[in-house]
Amino acid sequence: MCGIVGFVSDKKIKVSDLILGLKKLEYRGYDSSGIAYNCDNKIKYIKKTGRISELEKVALDHNLLEEPFYCGIAHTRWATHGMVSEQNSHPHMDCKEQFAVIHNGIIENFQELKNQLEDRGHVFKSQTDSEVIVHLIEENFKKDLLQAVLATLNLLKGTYAIAVMHKDSPNEIIAARKGSPLVVSNIEGISMLASDVTPLLKYSKDMLFLNDGEVAVLTPNKYYIYDLEGKPIHRNPTKIFWDESLAEKSGYPHFMLKEIFEQPHSLKSALVGRLVNGEPQIQEIKYLYDFVKNKMNKIYVVACGTSYHAGVATKYFVNKYSNIDFEIEVASEFRYMNPQVDDRTLVLAISQSGETIDTLEGVRIAKNKGAFVLAISNVVGSTISRESDAVLYMNTGPEIGVAATKTYTAQIALLYTLASQIIYWKYGKNNEIEKVLKEIEKVPKIYEELLNNTNGHMMELVKKYKNFKDMMYIGRNFGYPAAMEGALKLKEISYINAIAYQAGELKHGPIALLDENFPVFAIVPFGGLRDKMISNIMEVKARGAKVIVLVSKEDTQTKKIADDFIDVPIVSEPLLPLIVAPLTQLFAYYIAIEKHLDPDKPRNLAKSVTVE
Ligand code: F6R
């Protein structure tokens, strides 16, 4: 969701630098963009709805791309309050255009503040909640920008990450955060800020992640951190090891495809040093041994979307190999329930971005109730990883495509390894688990073969099924999270109404939907439940629906009754969601391509969901 970037430097920066920064944030999701910069003590700004390339075109048409300045801020907006329009795009300016503000988050008391400001004569140009911030700064400004921002922040209810410029302070940007992410950095005469590290990696690897209630003053040579009362705070930056090239497409037409093909490598990185010759050895959680062995009586997963699906797969895993009580809840529900967690619960907060607001609130609630919260995240320094008691990083490198792909498979592999370590601690070693873990170590190799050999056949299927408006994914047991994830991938990037059910639930309602216009994707297990699944496929076929089976190469019997098939390598049952994921991802990807949709930027979606 909304992206923020800004630079203040003693050397000249150009509009094109700000635009490049915005492009690195595109993946977060947005519908308009804008920039403001200080030119000879005058704030210039441009805004545009649609893609950043549209904004770039405006800058090009007006010969602004190479215009130099020392201080500038830029923003991608994901509309919440007020429609998508240039007026509602950021930056917002005060009545006299002395200040420019960009904002990510929601100001909950904006209406009340706006009424008061209008009564006092302020004229608003947008319908946004954000514009109140700049008018309040205008009112609170005496001589000092920091003091004006602090006074303003104390009036705001809700969430924000902001960056503020003043026309008479060309060497200064003030930034602040509460609830929405913000990172600052400095190197050789340039200070910068952004919603996440991707626009800044080009310049520096040392990042300081602002905490809630912190304000940063950026000047070319240094940045200073304060609390909301203006007291200085001293904290060291975190070193980020991501390479800028990881956030490039490297010859692939889309990030999503690149990330699908990265899975042999990303899965390996997630497990390095953690799963060694079939042995779970996660050093980062060694100190949890006593808690797990002697106190823990429940695992509770809190997550959203794809991360939730990885959690569901883990539930089946823990349930298959132990008696540990395991609950899982979607974070947006968890936070408004009375979740049964206490100081004997291990809460796993799964979040690729580490910024999902619902999961973050879940973390806070669980911690308040005394639980130990372990975050599983891909983003070093993200809010969830910092607020949790401990964190396991997925180490997959940045995921830019909005649809989660490589982080999902890394999550499953890492969560299975974690669950195994916990089960071993509680009950001792287990040969069946060891067999599964040894197979997980072979998955990167299996992925390589799978990804290199599916294309031709996959494209035939894509052409045949791309025009259907609906599609159902069904699975049982470990096949169920695989079905949910397959359906989510398809719906979010191809806009086909793809839904998922446990195959046994069909006859309790969903089967009424099926006819020749509603194909079914059946994920067929290799073991005990295969026959049950075949019965479900027969029921579906009897309603005239076409069936595509994801099935082992050898299973000719199932292939015969299906309309189409995709071969799946035979693995132990728990690996089913892991092994079919690249196939359902590719199917969704190519359907989107055939429909001329951009899979990296699905409509209405954001990579980092920082509003509720
Ligand atoms: C789907 C997808 C989303 C995310 C969800 C949670 O492809 O990416 O469903 O999984 O928004 O995001 P994180 O894992 O960042 O908390």
Image (cartoon, rainbow, N blue to C red):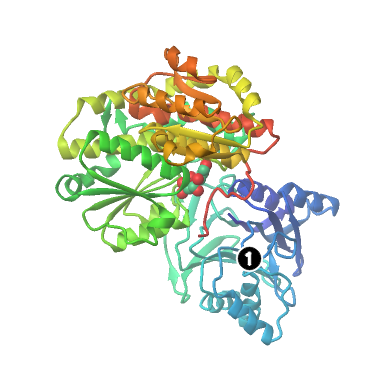
The reply, left or right, for residue 302 in relation to residue 257 is left
Up-down: is 588 above or below 572? Answer: below
Q: Residue at (64%, 34%) from the top-left corner?
A: 592
In the orientation shown, which residue stands out farthest toward the bottom?
120
Q: Residue at (71%, 62%) from the top-left corner?
A: 36
* Residue at numbered disc 1: 81
Front-most of 554 and 184? Answer: 554
Q: Amino acid at mark 1?
A: His
Up-down: is 304 above or below 193? Answer: above
Q: Residue at (53%, 62%) from the top-left corner?
A: 223
Residue 415 occupies quadrant: top left
Give the x, y percent position of residue 305: 47, 46
The reply, left or right, for residue 49 in relation to residue 439 is right
Give the x, y percent position of residue 98: 71, 74
- Looking at the rendered image, the quarter that the N terminus falls into is bottom right
The reply, left or right, for residue 58 in relation to residue 166 is right
